[in-house]
Image (cartoon, grey):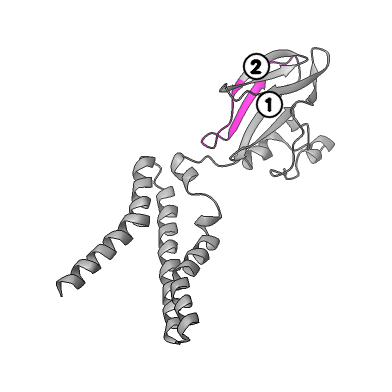
């Protein structure tokens, strides 16, 4: 293995802090060295790749649906590839590869490609964050248990503690089922994202309301 191969074989740091694009990267250019930078505007869909003040290429800005955008630069001898990536919402990262190696960390482009962020459709984008995990499950369970705990604090009746436990299990179990449904719907990318959101919304909000109305109707009859 050559020294260059060793330098390009270690694992990339996807979460690492990239340099400010305004500072630029030094790249071989027209028989010498040029400074490459990436200029983005909030009002344009394309980013401009600039070398020594001259726009040499334009590329689409990354999105959560297309989080990895490669743009090859027509250089004289050494191939240059600029990659824009968006691992998370509101966070863009720029990588510059010269002769197949990243200028910042020396990792090969092929290795970086194996670590590129996965694309997310609009359904997946709507169900992300800590609320759709253990924190949300515990929080909803506690909320459902609070009324019974308040009654126990006023009356010291032990039965309210049992009711609090049941309330916690109902709330946590219900949200766990919804999260399992969301994970299953993530695999159904052929379904329209609006349909999948409607299914989750119905289960999350519509089903409990219908259940309460049905119980009220049955109890009023008897």
Q: Which residue is mark 1?
A: 82
Q: Quadrant of the N terminus?
A: top right
Residue at 67% in and 38% down: 112
Please report the residue visible at 27 percent of the width from the left and 60 percent of the height from the top. Answer: 210
Residue sitting nearer the eye, 192 or 78: 192
Residue 86 belongs to magenta span = no
Residue 176, position in %: x, y? 44, 63
Q: Is residue 62 left or right of residue 208?
A: right
Residue 81 vs 92, above or below: the answer is: above
Q: Position of residue 47 (x, y in %)?
A: 63, 22
Coordinates of residue 118 in the picture (x, y in percent): 55, 42
Residue 68 appears at what percent x and percent y? 59, 33
Q: Eyeballing the image, is 219 above or below 85?
A: below
Residue segment shown in magenta: 59-77
- The quarter of the displayed image where residue 49 is located: top right
**In this image, 177 relative to 219: left or right?**
right
The residue positioned 55% from the left and 33% from the top of the image is 63
**Residue of label 2:** 57
Can residue 1 be spotted in the picture? Answer: no
In the foreground, 150 or 199: 150
As for residue 68 lying within the magenta part, the answer is yes
In the image as oriented, which residue stretches furthest toward the left? Answer: 221
Total numbered labels placed on residues in the image: 2
- Is residue 44 shown above or below 127? above
Are the two marked residues, 2 and 1, in contact with CB atoms closer than 8 angstroms? yes
Image vertical order of residue 150 relative to residue 136, above or below? below
Residue at x 37% of width, y 52% of height: 200
């Amino acid at each position: 293995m050559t020294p260059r191969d060793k330098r390009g074989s270690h694992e990339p740091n996807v979460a690492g802090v990239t340099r400010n694009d305004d500072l630029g990267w030094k790249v071989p250019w027209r028989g010498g060295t040029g400074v490459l930078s990436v200029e983005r505007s909030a009002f344009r869909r394309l980013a401009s790749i600039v070398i020594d003040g001259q726009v040499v290429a334009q590329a689409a800005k990354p999105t959560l649906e297309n989080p990895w955008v490669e743009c090859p630069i027509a250089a004289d001898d050494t191939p240059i590839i600029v990659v824009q990536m968006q691992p998370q919402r509101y966070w863009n990262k720029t990588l510059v590869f010269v002769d197949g190696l990243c200028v910042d960390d020396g990792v090969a482009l092929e290795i970086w490609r194996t670590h590129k962020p996965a694309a997310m459709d609009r359904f997946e984008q709507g169900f992300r964050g800590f609320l759709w995990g253990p924190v949300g499950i515990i929080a909803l369970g506690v909320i459902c248990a609070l009324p019974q705990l308040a009654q126990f604090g006023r009356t010291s009746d032990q039965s309210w503690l049992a009711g609090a436990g049941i309330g916690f299990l109902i709330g946590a179990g219900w949200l766990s089922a919804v999260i399992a449904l969301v994970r299953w719907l993530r695999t159904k990318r052929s379904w329209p994202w609006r349909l999948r959101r409607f299914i989750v919304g119905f289960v999350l909000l519509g089903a409990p309301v219908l259940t309460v109305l049905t119980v009220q109707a049955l109890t009023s009859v008897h």
